[in-house]
Amino acid sequence: MGELMTRDLLAGPGEVAPRPSASPLTGGRDAQVWRVDEQRVVRRLARAADAEFEARVMIYAHSHGVPTPRVHDVTGCDIQMEYVPGVSMLDALVQDPRTFVNHARALADLHERLHSIEVPSWLPAGGYPATALLHLDLQPGNVLLGERGPVLIDWSNASVGPPSLDVAVTWLSIALKGTGQLGASQLHDARQTFLAAFLRRFDRAAVVRELSRGVAFLLADPLITDEERRAVVAVRDDLQQLEGRIPGRRWARGGASDARIGCPDVEDC
């Protein structure tokens, strides 16, 4: 695997990848996951370089105390890694809305743990100051609730930059697509409750300042759907009003940007 990874960083010996005809355990637009056995899965990406990059970031984060699946091997486009039994945080939220505040706090914990570790010198900064390691998709759908607690998956967007940018992207993801499994009647209140508990851990003014860059990041995703693009553009058009609000005061509800972005009344939590 050349300069990207050395064998002594891997968790254990590799296994043969699953048969191509096997049904994937999960699948997304950029990768699919197959079960190998009771301990391991294979995450298959489109390109070998993407697999090597993601595996290297996961190994680095895990070695610095961030909860990720252990990486066993990388072969071509396949990352063989630890199987983490359990549901995603998103599924847990849908199953029991009473868990919203606790899970929001757990999500904030993951951000803080990730942003506190040393920034890897080999990770490209993407034009941002290299102040923290960023996940850039750290939302409930990418957190597995395993036996040892929350485990962060899907590191394909990893970069470095200001922590508030990571939080802003999470905010946008929750507002725009992270609650897609909730019914329409639940969406507004659920989003308000979750975001209020999540955002009160951070400097809201700093996060709001990064929302425009968060929107630009989401729009640059080559896999974004037309529906998602329209939703993101609608939020972008309302950001000037949002950015003009006074930090630390109660945020008024009812405006167009509130409806689209799910602005929380943070003093309610």
Image (cartoon, rainbow, N blue to C red):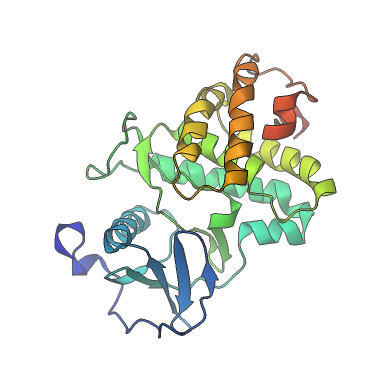
Q: Residue at x 40, y 83 (%)?
A: 18
Q: Residue at x 38, y 47 (%)?
A: 158
242 lies above or below 115: above
What is the quadrant of the C terminus in the image? top right
Q: Furthest residue to the left?
A: 2
Query: Which of these two is toward me, 134 or 169?
Result: 169
Q: Where is residue 235 drawn, in percent x and y?
A: 62, 30
Count the labels in the image: 0
Query: Which of these two is toward me, 185 or 208?
Result: 185
Query: Which of these two is toward me, 43 or 268?
Result: 43
Q: Residue at x 15, y 58 (%)?
A: 3
Residue 40 position by quadrant: bottom left
Residue 266: in sight, yes or no?
A: yes
Q: Where is residue 107 drawn, in percent x and y?
A: 58, 47
From the viewer's perspective, is 223 left or right of 171? left
220 lies above or below 66: above
From the viewer's perspective, is 79 left or right of 201? left
Q: Where is residue 167 drawn, in percent x and y?
A: 52, 37
Q: Furthest residue to the right?
A: 185
Q: Furthest residue to the front?
A: 226
What is the quadrant of the N terminus in the image? bottom left
From the viewer's perspective, is 97 left or right of 84? right
193 lies above or below 86: above
Residue 265: in sight, yes or no?
A: no
Q: Where is residue 89 drawn, in percent x and y?
A: 63, 57
Residue 82 position by quadrant: bottom left
